[in-house]
Amino acid sequence: MPTESTDYRQMWSDLGLDLEAHDALLEVLGQGYQAVFLSQQNRPKGMEYFDFVMSEVHGLRVKELLDEKAAGRKVFGSFCVFVPEEIVKAADGTLVGLCTGADFAMDAVEEYLPRNTCALIKSAFGFKLGKVCPYIESVDLIIGENTCDGKKKAYETLDTIVPNLYVMDLPQVKNARGRELLKVEYMRFLRKVEELSGVTIDVARMKQGIARVNAKRAALHRLAALRAVAPAPISGLDALLINQVSFYDDTERFTQSVNAICDELDARVAAGEGVSPKGTPRILMSGCPMAVPNWKLPWVIESAGGVIVGEESCVGERGMRGLVSDEGETLEELISNIVDRYFDIDCAIFTPNTDRLGHVREMHESYAADGVIHYSLNFCQPYQMESYPVAQALQNEGVPVLRIETDYSPEDAEQLKTRVEAFLEMIQ
Ligand code: BJ8
């Protein structure tokens, strides 16, 4: 989190942030980061880079985005992994994830949204209404998407609060018509990006956009594969952090840093070294995405003696799976390739969504997990509803499953710890 010595106050003030509230937020985040991440033992040296990024997540990174804007490039913000970064990159733009991982200004939020809205949606509103997110204040365009009912309806309200919201329609069924809708919407988005940036996206630009995002995803695939080894060479918390940083950081610098830490982990694997002793229960997490600084459940699991070896989540494998083919001689063919990759994302908003269960099974096996912890946010109907059939099917196959429903408040941490400890004991 930004340190006292770096002075970004003028920048934050120019962005319209509430400096007092923002100071309080950074203070809490800094303490949380110290307790959750910096206190871990035996961290790879390569994590120093990601610690640095996090220490500057509201400082240097925001300044870089403002510098890009000053140089005439556009910055886009999104809440969902269905927004195709390749198209933004093709126009020399930058896509960042917007803050959705902590409770803030809840009284103000509940004037706009029902109390029984998931914490992720409430958080997006809280950061805006509380004036503590430099990203939402910096972006040229906020991209919403018609996914779950909560988000769809919340964007109608957000549109009355911000001047720059664009909503992308998304299919809810995986058939030919659904695929066609996604393609039409990606073409519409491409035109919007062109209009805003003043850049005409041709085949060469599109191929370059695809290559840059593919390189980032390939580095994350490499990291994921290293976690399949026992003993795990990196903690689940650190791996989650890297995935979280992928939504903010400069693409090329991030890709290089992930490959660098993977080189280090390769050496650990070759030497048979891990972050936890042999026999540590290996956990696959599955469910809702975890945005910064939503670290509660992973922290509970790893401080209770488990090690998380994979996340079936949009901040994790669901969000990064697959690459986009760059085969094709027309823009239309390349957009089709982009659709091919994104249409495979098995978000719980789809009905039916049977592929997701297949992916959880596959991950449980390939990461040699001992059990699955299914995580749903309270009031998230899509993932809460799917938690039952997913757990049922896995349990019938002999896979131990623990279903957790929680939110962002720290209040249930002790209770969660008790349940997780009992689960770890059972699977050991
Ligand atoms: S592709 S998972 S990032 S929509 S937690 S807001 S589902 S009520 S975040 Fe998501 Fe895209 Fe799907 Fe992934 Fe609604 Fe549930 Fe809240 Fe959620």
Image (cartoon, rainbow, N blue to C red):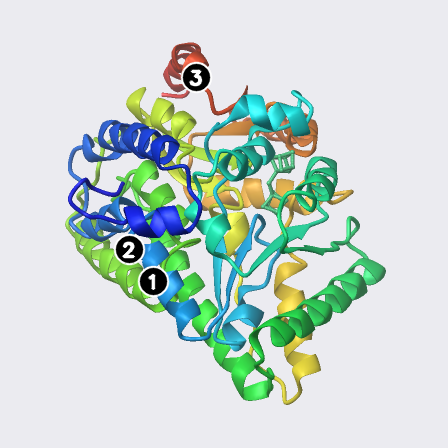
On-image quarter of the N terminus: top left
The numbered disc on residue 64 is: 1
Q: Residue at x 20, y 41 (%)?
A: 3
Crowdedness near tag 1: few (<14), some (14–19) or many (≥20) residues, C-alpha within 10 Å: few
The numbered disc on residue 423 is: 3
Q: Residue at x 52, y 66 (%)?
A: 323
> Residue 152 placed where, x, y %?
73, 42
Asked whether disc 2 touches disc 3, contact meaning CB atoms under 8 Å apart, the reply is: no
> Residue 139 placed where, x, y %?
50, 57
Q: CA distance from mark 3 to mark 1?
A: 44 Å
Does 237 appear above or below 194?
above
Q: CA distance from mark 2 to mark 3?
A: 41 Å
> Residue 29 placed where, x, y %?
32, 32
Q: Residue at x 65, y 25 (%)?
A: 111
In the image: residue 260, left or right of residue 332: left
Q: CA distance from mark 1 to mark 2?
A: 6 Å
> Can you tell which of label 2 and label 3 is closer to the viewer?
2
**Ligand 1: image quarter:** top right
> Can you tell which of label 3 and label 1 is closer to the viewer?
1
In the image: residue 385, left or right of residue 411: right
Residue at disc 1, CB closer than 8 Å to ligand 1: no
The amino acid type found where label 3 is placed reads: Phe
Q: Answer with mark 2 or mark 3, whichever residue precedes in sequence.
A: 2
Could you say whether the residue bearing mark 3 is in a helix, strand or loop? helix
Q: Residue at x 40, y 54 (%)?
A: 248
Does 211 appear above or below 55?
below
Asked whether disc 1 touches disc 2, contact meaning CB atoms under 8 Å apart, the reply is: yes
Confirm whether residue 191 shows in the render.
yes
Residue matched to label 2: 60
